[in-house]
Amino acid sequence: MTTQESTKAIGVTRARAALVAIVTLLAAVDLSLKQWAGAALADGQAVDLGPVELRLGFNSGVAFSLGADLPAGVVLGITGLIVVALAAFAWRATRTATVPVRLALAAILAGAVANLLDRAGDGVVTDYLHSGWFPTFNLADVFITAGAAALVLVSLTGSDRAED
């Protein structure tokens, strides 16, 4: 292995370690907030924070309650397959992706992992952010949406691939 190849391999290893660390951190933050919301908002009270209020809700489906009528095991299985595919894609993409793409993929994967782990316990995802005009959601949903928007933005600007 040449020095250049060795340096590139170290860079890929660092990028993958950063991906795992970011996903772990963001998922832990979301899961901690879900646990807090489940305890603090269990009595049905809402906390007004201006444009958004904290209100406990549960979603047995996926985005916008799609699939809510399906058995919990089916939703969990399909979601799990999607998360595994996304994780494999993010892992492979770190070889050539720019830092913004890596961060966007980490955000999406963190949100997906957090929602999957939350759903695994009782078949529902804990939601706690309510705007009044939009379905109740959680921080993991924000990570997924913001990551997807960032991917679109970097794709439109043509800055989604690192130079060799």
Image: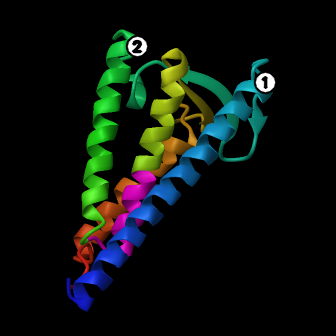
Q: Looking at the image, which residue is at 66% across and 47% down?
A: 51
Residue contact between numbered discs 2 and 1, judged by CB atoms under 8 Å: no
Note whether residue 32 is visible: yes
Circle 1 Cα neighbour tier, 10 Å, few/some/many (<14 / 14–19 / ≥20) = few
Which residue shows up at 33% across the image and 11% down it? Answer: 70
Q: Does the magenta segment cover residue 99?
A: yes
Residue 12 x, y percent position in the rendering: 33, 72
- Please say if 33 is above or below 71: below
Per the rendered image, the range of residues in magenta is 97-108
Tell me the element at label 1: loop
Is 92 displayed left or right of 132 in the figure? Answer: left
Q: Nearer the viewer, residue 62 or 105?
A: 105
Question: Which secondary structure, mark 2?
Answer: helix
Mark 1 belongs to which amino acid?
Gln
Query: What residue is disc 2 on?
Result: 72
Residue 128 among those drawn in magenta: no
Q: In which quarter of the image is the C terminus?
A: bottom left
Residue at 45% in and 40% down: 113
The N terminus: image quadrant: bottom left
Percent x, y for residue 9?
A: 29, 75
Q: Residue at the spot x=36%, y=9% of the render?
A: 71
Q: Would you identify the image quadrant in which residue 47 lies? A: top right
